[in-house]
Amino acid sequence: MKVGLLTREYPPDVYGGAGVHVEFLARELGSLTELAVHCWGEGEADGVVRHRAWADLDTANDALRTLSVDLSMAAALEGRDLVHSHTWYANLAGHVGKLLHGIPHVMTSHSLEPLRPWKSEQLGGGYALSSWAERTAIEAADAVVAVSRGMREDILACYPAVDPARVHVVHNGIDTDLYRPDPGTSALHRHGIDTSRPYVLFVGRITRQKGVPHLLRAARQLDPGIQLVLCAGAPDTAEIDREFRTLFEELGHTRDGVTWIPRMLPRPEVIQLLTHAAVFVCPSVYEPLGIVNLEAMACGTAVVASRVGGIPEVVSDGTTGLLVPYDAGQPERFEHDLAVLLNHLAADPRRAGAMGTAGRHRAVREFGWGAVARRTLDVYESVMELRKN
């Protein structure tokens, strides 16, 4: 089967969970299909074709630039048997490719535009375009892959025109040979983290979705002996960047042990940071699955996370971590409860260690990429079979 895999992010340009998903899925699918990856960028090598937005649109709204990339991707799909797109940045390319080449379109939903209204801050009027692109693609797709059961429910609620029989759940995965405990501490020393004190770690983008402002406000209530390490970059907008910097500076005036690493680090450094954290924290207000929680679990670290979206399908409350209910109408309650649980686990290394061990076992047992790829191939084959009939 000749498959075209469409994505915005692909190594070396990966900044979010969707990019991680495509990177490892492509690695496994490469041995099961005749795979061609199409992503953003320039050049072509080793089965990866990179597409640049039209030069005439260099100063245009990002949504318009995305549509130009989508048209380039769609034109390059000739000869493929099936196209599989990831995120709204590539969904319209999959839809146009389906129409142009008469091939089935499978799309994976990593998030949904109707549930991310804050994206209007980033895209302006382009948010209406991104929402239109997603709706057009998802309602016409031959199959939709949801990365969690919670995500499947969201898809059917946001897009009632989608036939439930076409929505399949295939969880995100984790490479537990790559993500595993690393006893080295060079990355900690390099970034000025005190190895004699426990630290809470956040890894992710600076965006409304990831709940970073909530974490910074919650950190005011952390025990003084606990450090906070923020591996946080790629702000969505200038506004969220300013809010983050203001809260970070305010926190620094009231306590020590707050470290901000303002960029996405090489994977080996992230693995060391995950390994040695007393607790990993995921304060997301919206999260279809939360692959970063799997990464922390695979490194043997306990997780404190929001009880939203697909996170409860990854973090087993009371076994591999602790979950905090989130109510958008009560942000102070969420921040207080988040701080209470972080303090609790950081002060109880025995319990946190047991959760980390259980998390590692769960990641190995249930979330391997080989199984994810095989389940994805099952979706492809079911779509191709329906096409024959």
Image (cartoon, grey):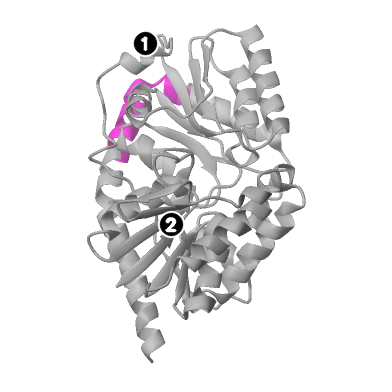
Of the residues under marks 1 and 2, which one precedes in the sequence? 2
Q: Gap in Å between the C-alphas at discs 1 and 2?
A: 38 Å
Res. 153 in view: no
- Identify whether 187 is placed above or below 44: above
Which amino acid, mark 2?
His
155 drawn magenta:
no
Residue 248, labelled with which disc? none
Q: Mark 1 or 2, which is nearer the eye? A: 2
Residue 189, labelled with which disc? 1
Nearer to the camera, 97 or 250: 97
Residue found at the far right of this picture:
125
Query: Is residue 272 left or right of 38 when viewed as pictured?
Result: left
Quadrant position of the C terminus in the picture: bottom left
- Identify whether 30 is placed above or below 19: below
Residue 231: x and y in percent read 49, 25
Residue 348: x and y in percent read 39, 21
Residue 38, labelled with which disc? 2
Which amino acid, mark 1?
His
Mark 2 secondary-structure assignment: strand
- Residue depicted at x 68% and y 47%: 119
- Residue depicted at x 56% and y 36%: 283
- Residue depicted at x 38% and y 72%: 80
Give the residues drawn in magenta, as a range.
Answer: 344-359
